[in-house]
Image (tube, rainbow, N blue to C red):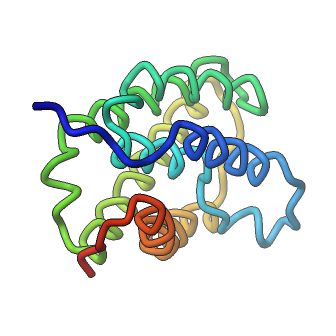
Amino acid sequence: MIRESNTPIYWVIILLLVAFLLKIVAWPQAVAMVMPPWVLLATLLCIMLVPEWCGVGFAFIVGLITDCINGPLLGQHAFIFVLLGYLAVKANKPLRYLPLWQQSMLIGCVVLVSLLLQQGALFLVGAASLGGKYWLSAISSAIIWPFLMIFFHRFQGQRVII
């Protein structure tokens, strides 16, 4: 029997709209360097919480929209989101039952892999480096992840393993 999610689809849409809004807003340089990749976090959160609606195709579409908004290479974010979305789909059940601090560390590593892939793609086309402080966004993602999970588990009426 397939378990239906308690999360309505409009929460997924609202989450993505807020993530795109946070990505588009012009932040000061110091804040922008440590800002987590909101769209990637929202995509991973949707894949984890609503796996029957959100999967690899969802990650591809969100990645393409991210590329259209401000990606230096068309398809860069789409490729990264599909790769990480596939890993999230495959590891969904074990990942959901990990304590929140372990999920946080894994998300930090996933964001670090995303940043490495972005840096590699920019290196291949000869674009400028992202800079040293840019890697701090992996740490900020790991810090923000538990708050996102707790916030959205409240809407599903589930307990969160801390």
Q: Nearer the viewer, residue 162 or 79?
A: 162
From this view, report whether residue 147 is shown above or below residue 76. Answer: below
In the rendering, at what x and y percent does residue 153 appear?
41, 64
Figure quadrant of residue 101: bottom left
- Residue drawn at point x = 49 percent, y = 22 percent: 60
* Residue visible at 60% across and 33% down in the picture: 122
Q: Residue at x 56, y 69 (%)?
A: 136
Residue 109 appears in which quarter of the rendering?
A: bottom left
Q: Position of residue 45 (x, y in %)?
A: 43, 50
Which image quadrant for residue 123? top right
Q: Is residue 2 left or right of residue 48?
A: left
At horizontal 22% and vertical 45% (from top left) the residue drawn is: 92
Residue 158 % position (x, y)? 31, 66
* Above or below, comparing residue 11 to residue 27 in the picture: above
* Left/right of residue 80 with respect to residue 137 in the rendered view: left
Residue 147 percent across, percent down from the top left? 49, 74
The C terminus sits in image quarter = bottom left
Position of the N terminus, as image quadrant, is top left
**3 vs 115, nearest the viewer:** 3
Q: Residue furthest bottom?
A: 162
